[in-house]
Amino acid sequence: MSPRSKQEYTEITYLRYKEATRHERTRILDEFCATCGCHRKYAIRVLRGFKRFTKPPAKKRGAPVRYRPEEIVTPLKQIWLAANLPCSKRLKAMLPLWLPGYVQHYGDLPASVVHALQAISPATIDRILRPGRIEYRKRGRATTKPGTLLRKRIPIRTNQWDESRPGFIEADTVAHCGNSMMGMFAFTIDCVDIATGWTEQRAVWGKGERGVLEQLTDMETMLPFPLCGFDCDNGSEFLNHHLLRHFAERPRPVQFTRSRAYHSQDNAHVEQKNWTHVRQWLGYDRLDNPTVVPLLNDLYRREWRLFHNFFLPSVKLIEKERIGSKTIKRHDPPQTPYQRIATSPHIPDAVKHALAKQLAQQNPFLLRKTMDIKLKKIFSL
């Protein structure tokens, strides 16, 4: 009898021996000694002290853990919340930018924690933050009313994602109307540069042509590069004579284009920013008090633009290939708009130095704290 067969036989006999009576155990011992060829006292010791075979626990696969989750979860979660819940890949790119501000705001971190946060992978971030993930399921309300007056004079452009020079802007409006489009309420004009991801936002009361033009002019003065192209949807707030003259009647005219009607993906860049830069912060509340417009613009012109353009990285589509029925998209590593400007050959060095000096004076946690105070005041109205 092989050792494995003997072990299996011993286990079966042990189960019988355990439940048997005194007289039955005598017969079981006789049978066991005859089968295994062992002494009776040895058989008694084996059957009394037998331990059933249990499968050993499986070893954890992968490399051993080089950090303590309980030590890094607090700073990681605080940065994640202050940055408005970014995905793990963007959060990984944020950590080197946010750690100096975290030390200034919350105090020093142990060297082991800093090293762990610098070496952490996006997959590990997902595992650590999984219990605190928040799902957003609300959807927006389309408020674009077609402006047919100048459609034939403003050309259509559909290859916006292919632009690599700073200065080509996509624009859209976000309605703060709540559940009803009745009456007057505030809108946010959202603009994003296609090449760098630089964003500017302004608030207007209603969608009047002159008010939209005034805020677009103000945004153009705040851009760190000259405006070369302006692309929008077919809303009447953009397709009007005021805006057409503003872009055409200047020494260096701006290329004014529009998307196709009922094709929101033609303006995919700004549609994405509508969610990440407006809806995630302001939600879907109705802002029907005119006094919120100057408060929003004060927030947009100060802390808002600095926070989003200097400290929140995003990915940029660099290649799109269709293979059969699937579309394969490849993106570059996450970078902030400032980092893309710093590496752009089209931006003068003087502008880069000015932005670097401005970045050195900012702390993302202080910016976020001021933003929360101003947003609380806006919502209180």
Image (cartoon, helix red, strand yellow):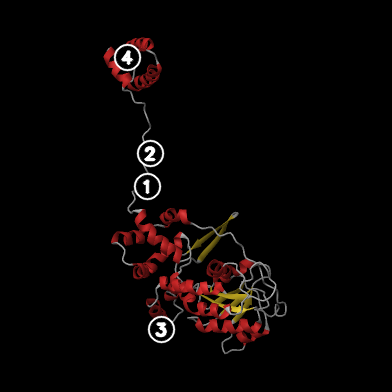
Q: Position of residue 337 (x, y in %)?
A: 46, 72
Separation of residues labelled 1 and 4 (CA atoms) = 44 Å
Of tags 1 and 4, the one toward the viewer is 4
The residue beneath circle 1 is: 62
The residue beneath circle 4 is: 36
**Do the numbered discs 2 and 1 sit on residues whose CB atoms are within 8 Å?**
no
| Residue 337 visible somewhere in the drawing | no
| Residue 18 visible somewhere in the drawing | yes
Separation of residues labelled 2 and 3 (CA atoms) = 60 Å
Q: Position of residue 225 (x, y in %)?
A: 49, 81
Say if 228 sits above or below 50 in the image.
Answer: below
Q: Label 1, secondary structure: give it.
A: loop
The residue beneath circle 2 is: 58
The residue beneath circle 3 is: 350
Separation of residues labelled 4 and 3 (CA atoms) = 92 Å
**Do the numbered discs 4 and 2 sit on residues whose CB atoms are within 8 Å?**
no
Q: Label 2, secondary structure: give it.
A: loop
Say if 370 sits above or below 324 in the image.
Answer: below
Separation of residues labelled 1 and 3 (CA atoms) = 48 Å
- Amino acid type assigned to the residue bearing label 3 in the image: Ala
Separation of residues labelled 4 and 2 (CA atoms) = 33 Å
Separation of residues labelled 2 and 1 (CA atoms) = 12 Å
| Disc on res. 283 | none
Of tags 4 and 3, the one toward the viewer is 4
Residue under the point 30% across and 19% down: 46
Q: Where is residue 85 in the image (x, y as percent from the top left)?
A: 48, 62
